[in-house]
Image (cartoon, grey):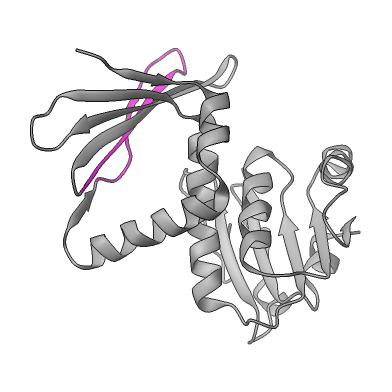
Amino acid sequence: MIVLYLTEQQVRELLPMGDAIRLVGEGFQALGRGEAQSHPRRRLILPTGSVLHSMAGACGKYFGTKVYATNPKFGAYFYFLLYDAATAKPLAMIEANWLGQIRTGAATGFATDRLARKSALVLAVIGSGFQARSQMEALLAVRNFDEVRVWSRSKEKCEMFVTDNSAVRGIRVAESAEACRRGADVVVTMTSAREPVLKAEWVSEKAHVIGAGTAHRLRFRGTCAD
């Protein structure tokens, strides 16, 4: 039996963001028609602080699960296991760090393409980690922004984010979360914060807001939480 193995670099090369947005959209539509399944994330928590996470799904001819192990001191390790729906035979094992980033960004891209105004010109990105990069990439794939503002709690990381993405038109560091948001047409929050980073009064009626971030439980206090 031959099982395909794909590395992170191969995932980057074989799955461009535009294709991912289209495929994620097809997946959502299949779920809506009852033709796909998606299981919520489950966790196995150890006393050492290590955690095993798993998320299973099925659509059409395939089913599989994303599994990843995390430890706050030693990092995270991601894999996706793909199987044939008709025979249950294993088809592929895929390194899934970048795959997860693409998929998360693609969901944002699909939602923004369907819901945000076509005339949106200003993007606000709150957060400057690895997931924020794919969020911005997906948003740039569906809208032509003249200005991209970025803010995070770490000024150093925020400046590095802007420098690394200097080719993006109009990208700059915002002075504060509020300054980042004010007047923006599209806002995305992608942080590990456990407290809200976006206040309701900062959001105008016409703004499109993508709230994403930590998978841990957050406390809501009348504001828009990431």
In the image, taking residue 177 as reference, residue 218 lies left or right, namely left
Instruction: Residue at the far bottom: name it.
Output: 205
x and y, in percent, of residue 48 in the image: 45, 12
> Which residue is depicted at the point 72% across and 56% down?
126
Residue 47 is a magenta residue: yes
In the image, taking residue 213 as reference, residue 136 lies left or right, namely right
Quadrant where the N terminus sits is: top left
x and y, in percent, of residue 223 in the image: 60, 69
Residue 55 visible within the image: yes
In this rendering, the answer to whether 11 lies above or below 205 is above
Quadrant where the C terminus sits is: bottom right
> Which residue is depicted at the point 67% across and 47% down?
132
> Which residue is depicted at the point 81% across and 62% down?
148
Main SS, magenta residues: strand
Residue 224 visible within the image: no
In this rendering, the answer to whether 99 lies above or below 71 is below
Instruction: Residue at the far left: name it.
Output: 87
x and y, in percent, of residue 2 in the image: 25, 14
In this rendering, the answer to whether 192 lies above or below 169 is above
Q: Which residues are magenta?
A: 39-59
Quarter of the image holding residue 183?
Answer: bottom right
Q: How many marks?
A: 0
Quarter of the image holding residue 9?
Answer: top right
Q: Which of the pair 139/210 is nearer the observer?
A: 139
Residue 50 is a magenta residue: yes
x and y, in percent, of residue 170 in the image: 88, 62
Quarter of the image holding residue 225?
Answer: bottom right
Q: Which of the pair 147/191 is nearer the observer?
A: 147
Q: Which of the pair 104/92 is nearer the observer?
A: 92
